[in-house]
Image (spheres, rainbow, N blue to C red):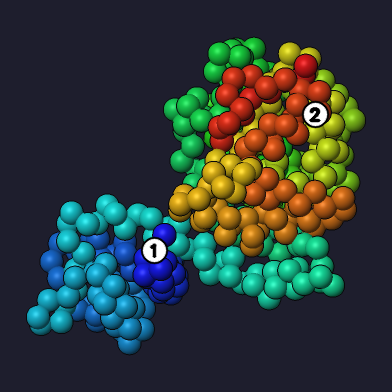
Amino acid sequence: MELDEYAEKFSSTVTNGFIALEIAIGHKLGLFDSLKKFTSPVTSTELAVSCKLKERYVREWLGCMSAAGFVSITPDDTYLIPEACKPHTQSSGFASVLPLIAANTASLLECFKEDGPKGYDYSNQLDTLLWLDHNKKSCDSKWINENLFPVGFKEIDTIINVLDFGCGPGSLTIKLAEHLPNAKIYGVDIDRNSIEKAKEKKAKENIQNVEFVLVENDHLDETWTKKFDWITLVDTLHDLPNPNFSISDIKRVLKDDGIVSAVDPCVHSDHKKNRGNQSAATLYVLSTFMCLPSSMSREPAAANGIGWGMQNRAEFIKSQGLKILGDENNGLIQFRKA
């Protein structure tokens, strides 16, 4: 990269970080949603009234968005998002995680220090977990078949018991229960707040074939030995502080012909292969604030995080006496007992 190009990219990235925070505010307060509903330009007062917000703050937000070029301003000081641009504001939802992870900055800075704590877990990050869980509400049968189910390795009618390991607040677990109405789905997590939220969702949606269980000693129920036909780990494996213990327990509760499906971010273990990949850079930010501290929150503090990468993940799975089925250099990896 040329020096001028480097300087421009560094400066614009910092500037865009500030603007992204304002985009997050617009998403959380419904300002983008409201603007998209208007078919003609509106005043700052009209937008504030539609969102039940203070006009002065809305006007400041509009100042930022119009300066950045994401909201158009007319000569008579009214505002709109052009019709063709409206679909592209959808990524504002991703920006909404920024204030949530930024709340951990003080704790993270201490973790960086030689004499500081190794990490921190998700016990005080319910809002972040709910954000991570939100998109899973849209994981319908089509998504499950294309992105998670061990197609070609397992038939749906052979699945009786399913374990969603690291279920969080439970949206995907409930979707799995809807996808497999003749199976019993168990969602487990070590986070009490997440399990409570999951149980609330189950009651609200009246899903009968799902059960949520808090794992209090990191050990799955002894009576579950060789119980499960299918086990899922979605954005979980790289977060675990003791993956050796967890995988050993997963092997114990997996049937001899059972399948495990693990989903982790598509990041190379070799930093050189991630150069120029903005998606990988973004994932590293999430990992620095969330995944790595979680993986270092307790002994033996595996310190994996997203930077662990697909290749190291594959080597770890094989080292545990498990057989990988199909492509191992992929976000989704399927494996079974060797």
Residue type at mark 1 is Glu
Q: Is residue 213 left or right of residue 202?
A: right
Q: Is residue 94 left or right of residue 182?
A: left
**Above or below: residue 284 compared with residue 330:** below
Task: Say which residue label 2 marks.
Answer: 319
**Above or below: residue 207 compared with residue 198:** above
Q: Identify the disc placed on residue 2.
A: 1
- Circle 1: is it few (<14), some (14-19), or many (20+) Cα within 10 Å? few
Nearest the eye: 222 or 197 = 222
Question: Residue 117: x, y in percent?
Answer: 82, 68
Q: Secondary structure at mark 2?
A: helix
Q: Is residue 177 left or right of residue 146?
A: right
Image quadrant containing the N terminus:
bottom left
Mark 2 or mark 1: which comes first in sequence?
Answer: 1
Question: Residue 211: x, y in percent?
Answer: 70, 36
Determine the residue located farthest toward the front in the rendered image: 2
